[in-house]
Image (cartoon, grey):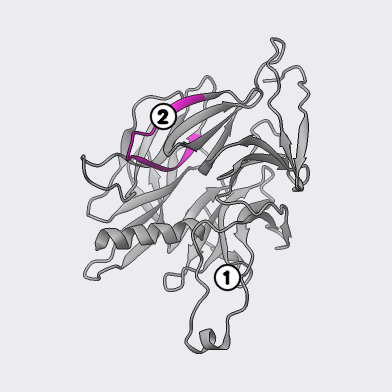
Amino acid sequence: MRRVLALLLTLLLTSCGTSATTAVATQTVGSTAVASTPVPSPTTIPTSSFYAIELSAGQQALVAIDHIFAVRHTIFQVPTNGWLASFDLWPVAGSGGRFVAAYAPPPPPGEINFGFTSLYLLPQDGGEMELLLGPQVDGELFFNPVWSADGQSIYFSHVTPREGEAYAFDTSLERLHLASGQIDLIATDAIWPQLSPDGTMLAYVHVEPATLANSLMMADPDGGNARELVGVEMFTAVDAPVFSPDNHMIYFSAVEPVAARSWWDRLWGVQVAAAHNLPSDWYRISIVSGDVERLTEINAVGLYGRFAPTGEPIFAFASQGGIYEMAADGSDVIKWLEGAFTDSLAWAP
């Protein structure tokens, strides 16, 4: 659970279309091919775009990136001392969709932004951030927002300070119904929600509060019938689940177990804590058989992926080292674009 430890540390600190085919040349760096940007052609029409949070020279921007020519267009420039933690996109033809974003605006001059994010809505083609859900008490924050499969609700993680206890916080997974404003509790000690394409299944990560050990879970959309898919004994950390287009697999980012604990550690009950931003790789698990398969060996930081919206078996993922693409089985991995991209990716037609 690489990002959660940083979140908890923050809390502690604060409490103290089709087209003509275009050939793409590649070069190989280690075991990963790096794609070169094709030369624009008037006969080639871009069919899709990536949306990502790009970090450059210490500044964040939510950008749209043309999938053919890799041309960037800024959707939202994060102001100095602001923080855009993550987003999800509900796309609509003609750029009429909406982002839901976990965002902390700049504080008053001279103050520190501790990253206490609220939920905001933003038009797909850019504009002003509109507050959707904000804190009612100091130390409260909202993060990991994702749209439901029908676009009528938003799932998110919610951190609240525990009343009467210093440095203690509760984390829950909740669902906001946009039309009514009703909020449902889906699961406790849970983060990283993700809905299946057909809307019948929910994947999320359960966090053990005492040790920060986490496991991959699957449940009904309302949180019922929850069951563990990947336990804490298999990986040091798991996160960023995403369903395959056919609803049969869940892809997830994971960190292999670290070296075994010493007898001294075991004697004193020391747990192997999940660290923030550990290098990780992509795995997938069959929902039916439970078989787990490793897909990549790139050892990258901050993985977050999505499948192509065109129905092609292509999986793209952002990382702090660039944007990658690969086949659904993990083959043909290429680094599609160099750069630093953080914790979110959308792929829209």
Q: Indicate the quadrant containing the C terminus: top left, top right, bottom left or bottom right.
A: top right
- 80 is within the stretch colored magenta: yes
Seen from the viewer's position, the closer of residues 23 and 218 is 23
**Depicted 166 relative to depicted 134: above or below:** below
* Residue under pointer 1: 232
Q: Residue furthest toward the top?
A: 42
In percent of width and height, residue 273 lies at: 50, 70
In percent of width and height, residue 240 lies at: 56, 52
Residue drawn 64% across the image and 69% down it: 234
Q: Is residue 86 visible?
A: yes
- How dense is the environment of label 1, judged by Cα within 10 Å: few (below 14), some, or many (20 and up)? some
Residue type, label 1:
Val
Residue type, label 2:
Phe
**Depicted 246 relative to depicted 21: above or below:** below
Q: Give the extent of the magenta segment.
A: 73-89
* Residue under pointer 2: 76
**Depicted 24 relative to depicted 246: above or below:** above
Residue drawn 72% across the image and 11% down it: 43
What is the secondary structure assignment of the residue under circle 2? strand
Locate residue 41 relative to residue 143 in the image: left or right.
right
Q: Earlier in the sequence, mark 1 or mark 2?
A: 2
Q: Nearer the viewer, mark 1 or mark 2?
A: 2
